[in-house]
Every structure is written in C-alpha cells, then in structure tokens.
Image: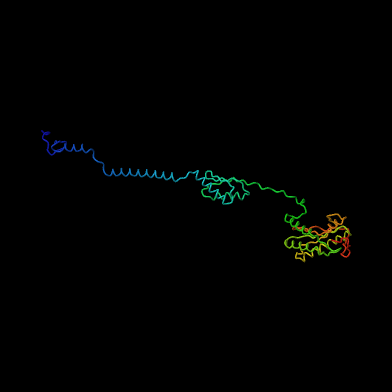
Amino acid sequence: MTGWMRDPRDRRGRSMGPGFGAGRRRSEARRHGPPRRSRLVELLVERRTLLLVVLLIGFFVVVAIGGTGRDDPVDEQQDLSGQVQAAMVRAGLPTIEVQVVDWTVVLRGRLASDDLKVAATRVAQAQSGVVGVENLIIVPAPIVEETTPEDETPDLPANQADLLLQARLSAAAARTPIQFGSGGDRITEDSIPTLAMIAEFLVANPTVRVQIIGHTDSDGEEDANLTLSRIRAEAVRAQLIARGVEAERLTPLGMGEYDPVADNVTREGKARNRRIEFLVLPEGQEGLSAPTTTTTEAPSIDEISDGDATG
C-alpha cells in the first residue's frame, strides 16, 4: 500500500510519459548533439593558432633576407685583395703581390730597403676588413763595394769632378803656351789670350784652387833654371790676380829642369820642356813640393843666364 500510495509531489525517477514532455527533451538532445564549448576556450585556441602562424612567417622572412643579403666569403676576400692592391699602387709600391687568405693579407715581392717593407705592412693594415698581415717581401742584401786601401790610393784629384776640371784647365793652357822674354819673367803679348782664358775659367769656378808650376829646359845652371821657373810662375800668378782671381787660390812653384816632357837635345824637345802647367788642388791638398838642389842659395834673377831664352 505504501509503494502504491506515493506522494504525487515526489517526482524523482518518475516518468510521466510522452504526454508530460520527457520524451520531447530526449529527442531534442539527440538532434542537436553534445553541448557547445565555451567562447573563452575558442578564443584561446584561435589566438594560439594565429601566433604560431605569425612566428612561422617571421622565421621564413628572416631566412629569406639573410640568404639574399649575405655575400659569398670568397667574393668578399677577392674584393679585399683588390682593395689592398690598389692601396699599394697609390703608395708607390706597384710591384707588391697581394693575396687574402682567411682575411689575412699575404704580401710577396722584392723591395730595395727594409723601410719600404715596413711601409707595405702599414698600408695593408690600414685597409678596412684586414684581420692580419703576413709580409713575405724579400729585401736583397746591399752590395758592398770594395775600397782601395788608404796606402794604395794614387796621388790624383779626389773625384771625377776634379779630373774634369783638370782636363779643361790643361787644355786651355796647352792651346797657346805661355811664353816669356829671353831669360826673364816678362810674358809675351802672344800669351795674353791664354792668360785671359785661364782667368775666365777660374772666375767661373770660384772654389777651384790651382798650383802654377814653371818648367825650363836643361840649358844653363841647374839652380838658375830652378829660380827662373819659380819667378815665371809668380809672374803668371800676378797676371791672373790682375784679372780677378783671388790670390789665395793660386800657389806658384818652380820645378826648373827636373820634370821634362821631351828630350833636351833637339830644339823642339827643349821648347816643349819650357812650359807653365796648372794643377787643380783638391780640398785638403797643397800640391807638389819644390825640388832640392845641391846649391844652398839660389841665384837672383840678375844672375840667371839667357840659356832658357823662350820660356
């Protein structure tokens, strides 16, 4: 009786049949499927998907930009090699060969000095992009010239310039020999052009010092000829001073008959021996020394014979 006589308000586990709507609710659930997810979950899923897509696109863009903007390392090193080579040409070192290996500049070639080798290294280091410099440039050893020992040096003008001056002066003096009157120191008029030419040469070369050397033939006494040659050398010196040559640049010397250039037998030989010579004196040299004679006192000009007549 108790199970049959339930309280009509107790609806738990009670089916009222299709007439009370229960069957209608179950059919709607089957038709519409499971319940929808919440809107918040859907938004989170959409944003995560969008973020993933953006990251993928950015990655591919970066890869694309990096692949197109990066040069080939080999080409970059070739460009650096050309840059350094051009710098060498501008620095006046066009013979240097330049090679770039792992961003290190290798220099090869030959240069005349160590200073130029150091300069080549500095030129390479100054270029942008150079990591290091390996300098393989060769500097040949200097050639050592053999020098003549001091005791074997000939007693000649010190250099080629002195030799040239000596040759020109000797040629001027030999063109028309300087002559003197019989047995004395008076210069003949025919010798004036030669004196003028020598004076002009010495004025044009103000640093040249010369020794004026008088010579005679062997006629007459030995001492008398020595004195006569010295007197005639002093006469030539006086004429050059009168034409503008400084006195301190002119040194007279008499050699007498001690330095002949021809025989003293024939007339022609004696004429050649009677002469005036001009010797260029290099810096620091004083020229030839006077010869010594057996006579203690040289004769005066009045005691000289006329044997050496034409000078």
What percent of the width, then of the height, locates residue 116? 61, 50
Q: Residue furthest bottom?
A: 242
Nearer to us in this view, 184 or 303: 184
Nearer to us in this view, 36 or 17: 36
**Colour logic:** rainbow
Nearer to us in this view, 303 or 288: 303
Nearer to us in this view, 310 or 86: 310
Work out which quarter of the rendered image holds the N terminus and state it. Answer: top left
Numbered disc total: 0
Residue 279, image quadrant: bottom right
What percent of the width, then of the height, locates residue 106? 56, 45
Q: Compared with residue 41, is residue 279 higher up or lower down, i.e. above or below?
A: below
308 vs 56, left or right, is right
10 vs 176, left or right, is left
Work out which quarter of the rendered image holds the C terminus and state it. Answer: bottom right
Q: Compared with residue 64, is residue 184 higher up or lower down, i.e. above or below?
A: below
